Amino acid sequence: MIRQLQAHLFIPLLFSFISTHSQAQVLLTEKQIIEMAQKTSPARQQIEATQKANTAKDYAVKSQYDPKLEASYSYFSSNENAIIQFAPVFHPQKLFNLGVSQKTSLGTTINTRLFSQQISTDDGFINNATQVGVQVGVEIDIWKNALGRLDRSQLNSARISKKISDLQADVNQHGFVLDIRKIFWTLMANELSLELSKELVKTATRQFSESKRKLQEGLGDSGDVARNQAQLQSRKSSVLFFSYQKELLISQLKSALPDLNATTITFNDNEAQKIEETAKRCMGLIIGQNQMNPSYSHYDDIVSLLAEQKTHEMRLAKASDSFDVKLQARYQASGVENSHNQAFDRLTEDFRNGYQVGVALQVPLGGDISRSRAAQVSATQSQFEAQKNKLALQLKAEHQKIQRAISLLLEASKSQGQTVESLRKSLVQTKRKYRQARVSLNTFIIEQDNLFNSELQLIDTKRQILHLLLDYFKLFSNHPCEINTAHGVQS
């Protein structure tokens, strides 16, 4: 029974050990996560899918102007009686057409076709009368789409949409990489806070052991032991809190980057020191830039493209209720005989021709289409103006915001750094005085807590500064700052 119980306890522990130690340990660097985000990630696949869908829309518009092969064949037979002697029932009838139609961006449609038809009558008076010929037709829009102005606007609008889609895909991919980097640097800040908490646990453990020793030797009291024990528990709680945060952040990172699954992640503390110096240089560049540089952002290009696209979309909207006039012309040459071969010979040797010219007019009646046109024009105007103004204001506001925010956070970081240095010096003196019994344990613990909290605040402020910069580069993705262009991140 005891052996069975031991086996039940041992097997789960064994599997837990194997699961834990089967994971590869990875010393994760920022460069590695950037490469992972740029190659394999669900977010990148979604961005590419959206981009491909917009590319398909562009090709769908262009496909209207591709040549089209058209073919048809029909056979007709009937046992009906003729209504009058001079209008016999022709049967069987065989009709065949093969041709190509081409719509151009100049408001013109061209059709060419080869055709044949063969007819007979019951009384044998007409037997396999065959006509073979070629036909060329053209339809030209001479008003609504004169010279293809609407066709070209539709093509240009689709082309611009494709450009905007490509730019937006670059922006989205760049933003995704920056979001991953934010998680990475939050993890680094968490790692620093966790290591700091672990060191303080060691210190609190020594103080707790020392207070118990003094109590046993009659040099201390139970109150000191309780205070040191409370401090130790508080430090352990901090370690648990930061460990919990670390697991959540690693889970986020692994969800975004599948390559990190089945790995145990460790970090290089030297990266935090490198990025701090780089961030200072970047902040200096941004603060020294009085005016926003439009060339630093893809959104400025998108604003320009939206203004151009608006012109084409407004032209299409305004023409939605216009009447339509088309000039139609057709030329035909054919040969007629009693078989396909003979008719084809007649076509090549002694054909007969004809032509047809006409005008087709289409005028919309009623007030609904006019009201629809007015609503469409208004909607198009509002849509493009809203998009353009939103992006332009967003760029300006983001630049102004980060200049103010950076100045405040830099000042806060400087002040906190000075506070930490002062508290460290003060703690050295307080520790010496505590050992000399010149200050109480409460004062010593308060000094330690003040330094601990100040160090945590400084770490968090530096994290906020870096996050602020990375958010800024989501809009200004072409900024030359080293943080933005690190490891080929720049779009």
Image (cartoon, helix red, strand yellow):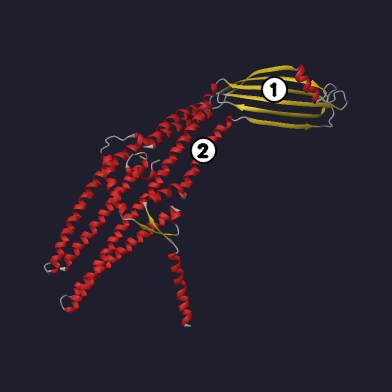
Most foreground residue, 95 or 470: 470
Does the image show residue 144?
no
**What amino acid is labelled 1 in the image?**
Gln
Q: Is residue 299 left or right of residue 74?
A: left
Residue depicted at x 71% and y 17%:
354
- Is 278 above or below relative to 264? above
Mark 1 residue element:
strand
- Is 349 above or below relative to 197? above
The percent coordinates of residue 271 (x first, y second) are 32, 52
In the orientation shown, which residue stands out farthest toward the bottom? 1
Q: Is residue 300 left or right of residue 92?
A: left
> Residue 86: which numbered mark, if any?
none
Q: Residues within 10 Å of mark 2 (few under 14, many from 20)?
A: some
Q: Quadrant of residue 93?
A: top right
Most foreground residue, 119 or 296: 296
Please tell me which of labels 2 and 1 falls first in the chain. 2
Q: Quadrant of residue 217?
A: bottom left
Q: Which residue is mark 1?
A: 135
Instruction: Tell me how far mark 2 sits from mark 1, CA to CA.
Output: 36 Å
Q: Residues within 10 Å of mark 1 (few under 14, many from 20)?
A: some
Q: Which residue is mark 2?
A: 55
- Is 65 above or below relative to 14? above
Does the image show residue 179?
yes
Q: Quadrant of residue 125?
A: top right
Q: Is residue 432 left or right of residue 58?
A: left
The percent coordinates of residue 359 (x first, y second) are 62, 19
Quadrant holding the C terminus? top left
Residue depicted at x 36% and y 38%:
478
The percent coordinates of residue 157 (x first, y second) are 49, 31
The percent coordinates of residue 162 (x first, y second) are 48, 35
**What amino acid is labelled 2 in the image?**
Thr
